[in-house]
Amino acid sequence: MVRMTGVIEEGVKDGLVAALSGRIALVVIDMQRDYCAPGGVIDALGHDTSHFAGVGARIESFLSRNRRAFDLVVFVRTVFPSWPLSRALGSHYARTALRRVRSSESADWFAVQPEAGDFVIDKFRYSAFVDTALDAMLRAARIDTIVACGATTDVCVDTTVRDAFMRDYSVVLLSDCSGGSTLARHENALDVLDGFFARVHSSVEVEDALGVRSESRAI
């Protein structure tokens, strides 16, 4: 399992370069105060949120160096509409702190935010593909591969990665640019996703592969 190191086997690196050889989109998922900051839902569920500041800083750093390598950069955020919850959602949320009064700042970006030219997708469920325009946008741009990151690895990132793969996108997940509700859940999600749905690599490894991709396109 590849995590934080920048040295990977040559065959694995070749596979990563190949996965990034087509048209690619960076999809940043739910880097919002509700999931990443004290007072949000992850905090209310009793979990530490201090690691999300580092996750956001690494996404920002990765974007600052590699934004131009992507054909699309998409920021996804969860919003909560005014209409009532379904019976299923209401019943499930009532079991935990998921059912709560949200502050007006809960949907605000945390540590990293879109720039001019980036796209923003609003979602209402864990998956960025359910009842949104994301799939239509990616297909219109002829995207082959999604590079995903954000919060939380074990819920919205996980669900979005699975749905992307089920829609025939190749997926690369940035392990150090994603954060889970707990470290154990983060690691478990990475293991399952790497085994069945995505290539899991550090941002250093992906940046190196993007460099190889740029060199090959320049020839």
Image (cartoon, rainbow, N blue to C red):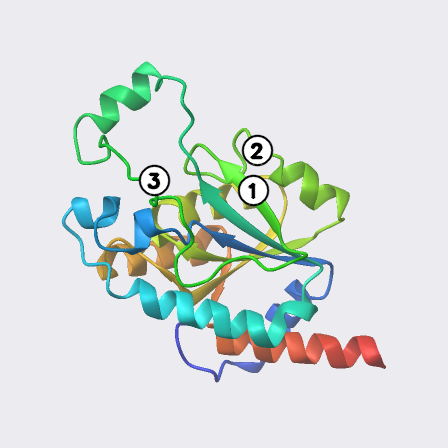
Of residues 5 and 131, the one drawn nearer to the viewer in this rendering: 131
Question: Marks 3 and 1, Cα distance to the nearest angstrom?
Answer: 19 Å
Up the image or down, 25 lies above or below 175; here it is above
In the picture, measured across the screen, residue 219 lies left or right of residue 151, that is right
User: Does residue 60 appear in this view?
Assistant: yes
Disc 2, SS: loop
Kind of residue indicated by mark 3: Ser
111, above or below 208, in the image: above
Which numbered disc, 3 or 1, marks the residue that appears first in the sequence? 3
Q: Earlier in the sequence, mark 1 or mark 2?
A: 1
Where residue 12 sits in the image (x, y, percent)?
55, 73
Q: Nearer the viewer, residue 201 or 48?
A: 48
* Residue at the (19%, 25%) spot, across then down: 94
Dot 2 or dot 3, earlier in sequence? 3
Q: Residue at x 61, y 40 (%)?
A: 134
Q: Mark 1 and 2 residues: CB-CB less than 8 Å, in contact?
A: yes
SS assignment at label 3 = loop
Task: Write the residue at 69% across / 42% down.
Answer: 137
Crowd band around label 3 with a 10 angstrom C-alpha radius: few (<14), some (14–19), many (20+): few
Type of residue at label 2? Thr
Check if mark 3's residue and mark 1's residue have beta carbons within 8 Å: no
In the displayed structure, 92 sits above or below 195; it is: above
Q: CA distance from mark 1 to mark 2?
A: 7 Å
Q: Position of residue 53 (x, y in %)?
A: 33, 66
- Of residues 179 and 75, the one drawn nearer to the viewer in this rendering: 75
Residue bearing mark 3: 104
